[in-house]
Amino acid sequence: MNQVFRCAVLSVAKHDYVARGVITHPRFELAVVADDADVPEWMHERNQQFADSQQIPYVRDIERALRDFNVQVAIVSSEAERHCDLSIRAALAGKHVIQDKPMSTCLSECDRLVETIQQAGVKFLMWNRNGLPSIQQAQRQIAAGTIGQPLSIHVDFYFAKDAGPPKGSRQPGYPPINWYAHQIASHVDGSDGGLGRSPMGELAVEGIYPLGYIQMLTGGRVRQVFARSTAHFHQVHADNGVEDLASVTLTMEDGLIATMAIGRIGLASHPSGGEIKLHILGTAGALVINEARPDVGVYYRNQPAKEARQRRVASENDFLLADNFAHAIDTDGPTLMDAEASRAIYATFAAALESARTGQVVDVD
């Protein structure tokens, strides 16, 4: 169980934080970056830059990278539409898969990936935040029976990050902001949100996090969803008909009620990552969990406007995710968010989007 797993990074068109997170663990190393030869040149440039930063080769041939570089793990962080395709190709080559979110932009693709992972007998992990110390502490408290049987859970997930110009800033007569072009351009400063040709709101881009907390802490399956959403903060969301703010009510299979409020509320709205809290009510008590804790406040003269004032400390989320993945491979055990769990989360926010569109309660497929 001391094997070091060699990883092929299949595109960093979106972000490189997953690959960088994986190698915080000593049992993983990056061997090659790869992508298809026919992707746009800007993707090749990003891939080459990351490969150079890691001093590893960049190969414009995914199958060759999976075949010729003695890798056991594929890390997928492409634009959203290609997530499942790249993960499936890696699984068919016998490689374990770590994938960035969202799982896909299409439920049928999620189903195809789940089936492929099962048939190939490889491990799958969706990169998530369930290893944060506050979430781990909440899980321990619930497992210990501190609040009795959970009855309801609410998650506020207000993400303090910009997404371009504020709503209402586009002058009359100016054309709507092009989603794909905007995401490509804004990638440099991290304000891109969901990179893909199809516009994606916050339920698709960030919904995996609060839904992942609910899934892990309750262990229940979502049966029905009712949601409301709007584009309240950002012009790019308003122009492309996707939400940057939403409220969702979830009915679980055991009768537990879960609710969440989610939004990309802008960098100026909060001194750090945003207001992210969990409220859990049980038969014998309640928990209120601040997701960012423990943290420290850092303030000084001439501090850059965009620098976070409150900073997480003692956070080993990346290491714990990678450690869980290595353990799952070693023991043929579960991962913190496997393909089936990831598919369930996708189906839940897809139902929420349909509910917001129709104004009706929607069953989760």
Image (tube, rainbow, N blue to C red):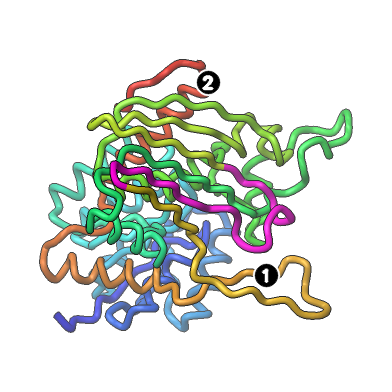
Q: Residue at x 40, y 27 (%)?
A: 351
Determine whether the residue tagged by mark 1 lies in a helix, strand or loop: loop
Would residue 271 be counted in the magenta stretch?
yes
Would residue 124 be counted in the magenta stretch?
no
Q: Amino acid at mark 1?
A: Arg
Q: Residues within 10 Å of mark 2 (few under 14, many from 20)?
A: few
Residue at the right extreme of this rendering: 172
Q: Residue at x 27, y 72 (%)?
A: 323
Q: Is residue 223 left or right of residue 203?
A: left
The residue singled out by tag 1 in the image is: 309
- Residue stretch in magenta: 263-284
The residue singled out by tag 2 in the image is: 357
In x, y percent, where is residue 128?
39, 57
Q: Residue at x 64, y 54 (%)?
A: 160
Q: Is residue 336 left or right of residue 169?
A: left
Vertical arrangement, residue 364 with respect to residue 214, above or below: above
Quarter holding the C terminus? top left
Determine whether the residue tagged by mark 2 lies in a helix, strand or loop: helix
Q: Is residue 325 left or right of residue 176?
A: left
Give the camera-side residue of 211 and 323: 211
| Cα–Cα gap, marks 1 and 2 | 37 Å
**Residue 46 image-quadrant placement:** bottom right
Quarter holding the N terminus? bottom left
Q: Amino acid at mark 2?
A: Arg
